[in-house]
Image (cartoon, helix red, strand yellow):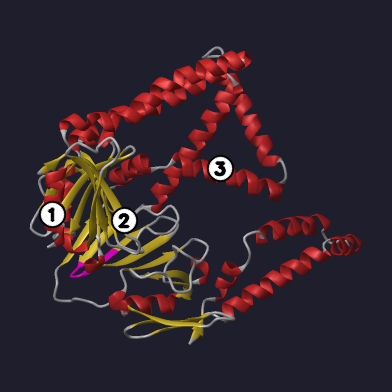
């Protein structure tokens, strides 16, 4: 058995390791070749050096206590210091094997390997892969060559165009994740380089405020700062998604599916077709109107890493999506919706955005009464708050008329809306764990209920179909139990 690539030692250092190293190096660089200055620096940084040495020693100790061996039928791992773990993950039980060649690891010919199954992780943290190792390039090739091959089957390849990837990144970029990154950059970066980042931000806000005030009178620095943070956060998320999914291609070879993407960081996934739990055709309101969609899949390990998206077909027209699914996911056929939400149930879809949109102006009026000097800021926040609420109201009206269930011979189709996203779930009947029927306080006494469908995976996924007739819901639950 062997240890991981030596570069993995850095993985086992603490989160704040670089917060100690970088200021230390900056101080050493400032000293230069002056021996007396170096001696004074060493006296002042003595404890920092001792802490860094201890962190590195502990990282090496952890690295030496994790060993692996790639066998013909799977990968065997031994880990642990006090409590020893030994386990084998067979390739036939694996749902997804992913390989990530980041721009930092490529010069060292190292690859991050993750192997996942529908069972829970043995040694890694909750939500992590069953096996996650940093291995040399030779072991990466050996592992992928050990994947079961079906040479008698026809090879099918799908390559996403740059336009589709651009639109996909545009739609699925998360402003929240981008803002969190920007906030982390300022907090952690400020600790390393001092107040330079903060000063740069405030200078940018001041400059933009001056430019905007020449066009729009009365704009406040607060409004400019908030808009700038949102724009920068969304822009970072967009660029990150675009680079992550660049050169996206998917190949199907019998029961084996290979997905490759990435511009700087190269990613490759092996997916066991029989382990795919369901397909998810996603749309937002604009995509629904334009009749375009993307296909995502539920397969343990695929899209599991931070900011990962389990996409199979990036955004394209509905006809092309259906053609691609017939080639890549031939068993996952969309059934016609036969069980629909009752038309009289529309109020349950729209009451939350209606109440919030109506309450926001009253809240703004109360805030202006208490804080009259903040009038322009409160008005700006009112407008910023009303826009997503009105948009949500329109989305929920569409959802009330499109939610329902379709039942095929082997597949079940579930259509519903979650926040701003429309989902069309195609799931095999044997991947449905169980069906639960539930009535809210307002539904009691009526012939209406909510249907919860739980699908298989490392953790069961829940899908809620609202406002279904009790009789039709019971019939659907009976069909799923057969």
Circle nearer the N terminus (3, 1):
3
Which residues are the magenta region? 253-258
Residue at 18%, 70% (x, y): give it. Answer: 254
Q: Disc 3 on helix, strand or loop?
A: helix
Q: Is residue 151 left or right of residue 300?
A: left
Find disc 2 in the rendering and name its residue: 461
Q: Is residue 199 left or right of residue 331?
A: right
Residue at 41%, 71% (x, y): give it. Answer: 130
Residue at 31%, 63% (x, y): give it. Answer: 457
Residue 248 in the image: x percent, y percent? 31, 55
Find disc 3 in the rendering and name its residue: 182
**Residue 299: which quarter of the image?**
bottom left
Viewer-proximal residue, 425 or 322?
425
Find disc 1 in the rendering and name its residue: 333
Report the mark closest to the observer, 3 or 1: 1
**Residue 217: which quarter of the image?**
top right
- Indicate whether 481 appears above or below 225: below
Q: Circles 2 and 1: CB distance less than 8 Å?
A: no
Task: Kindly report the distance in space between the C-alpha atoms of the residues bearing marks 3 and 2.
Answer: 31 Å
Residue at 62%, 43% (x, y): give it. Answer: 186
Task: Kindly report the distance in space between the C-alpha atoms of the residues bearing marks 3 and 1.
Answer: 41 Å
């Amino acid at each position: 058995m062997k240890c991981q690539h030596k570069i993995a030692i850095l993985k086992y250092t603490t989160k704040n390791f670089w917060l100690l190293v970088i200021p230390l190096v900056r101080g050493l660089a400032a000293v230069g070749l002056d021996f007396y200055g170096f001696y004074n620096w060493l006296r002042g940084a003595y404890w920092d050096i001792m802490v860094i040495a201890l962190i590195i020693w502990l990282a090496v100790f952890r690295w030496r206590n994790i060993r692996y061996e790639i066998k013909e039928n799977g990968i065997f791992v031994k880990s642990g210091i006090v409590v020893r773990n030994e386990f084998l993950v067979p390739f036939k039980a694996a749902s997804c094997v992913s390989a990530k060649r980041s721009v930092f690891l490529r010069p060292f010919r190292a690859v991050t390997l993750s192997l996942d199954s529908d069972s829970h992780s043995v040694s890694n943290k909750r939500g992590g892969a069953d096996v996650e190792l940093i291995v040399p390039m030779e072991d990466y090739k050996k592992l992928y060559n050990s994947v079961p091959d079906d040479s008698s089957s026809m090879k099918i390849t799908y390559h996403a165009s740059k336009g589709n990837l651009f639109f996909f990144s545009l739609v699925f970029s998360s402003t929240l994740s981008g803002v969190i990154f920007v906030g982390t950059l300022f907090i952690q970066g400020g600790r390393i380089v001092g107040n330079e980042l903060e000063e740069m931000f405030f200078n940018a806000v001041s400059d933009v405020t001056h430019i905007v005030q020449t066009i729009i009178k009365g704009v406040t620095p607060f409004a400019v700062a908030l808009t700038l943070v949102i724009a920068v956060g969304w822009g970072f998320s967009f660029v990150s998604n675009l680079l992550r999914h660049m050169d996206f291609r998917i190949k199907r070879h019998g029961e084996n599916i290979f997905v490759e993407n990435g511009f700087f960081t190269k990613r490759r996934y092996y997916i066991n077709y029989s382990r795919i739990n369901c397909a998810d055709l996603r749309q937002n309101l604009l995509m629904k109107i334009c009749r375009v969609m993307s296909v995502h899949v539920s397969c343990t390990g695929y899209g599991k890493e931070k900011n990962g998206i389990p996409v199979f077909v990036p955004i394209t027209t509905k006809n092309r999506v259906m053609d691609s699914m017939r080639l890549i996911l031939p068993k996952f056929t969309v059934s016609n919706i036969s069980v629909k939400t009752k038309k009289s149930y529309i109020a349950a879809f729209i009451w939350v955005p209606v109440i919030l949109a109506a309450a926001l102006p009253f809240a703004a009026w109360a805030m202006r009464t208490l804080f009259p000097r903040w009038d322009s800021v409160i008005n700006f926040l009112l407008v910023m708050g009303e826009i997503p609420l009105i948009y949500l109201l329109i989305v929920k009206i569409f959802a009330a008329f499109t939610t329902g269930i379709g039942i095929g011979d082997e597949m079940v189709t579930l259509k519903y809306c979650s926040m701003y996203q429309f989902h069309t779930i195609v799931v095999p009947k044997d991947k449905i764990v169980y069906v639960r029927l539930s009535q809210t306080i307002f539904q009691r006494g009526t012939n209406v209920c909510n249907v919860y469908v739980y699908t298989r995976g490392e953790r069961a996924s829940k899908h809620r179909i609202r406002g279904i007739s009790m009789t039709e819901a019971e019939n659907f639950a009976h069909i799923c139990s057969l």
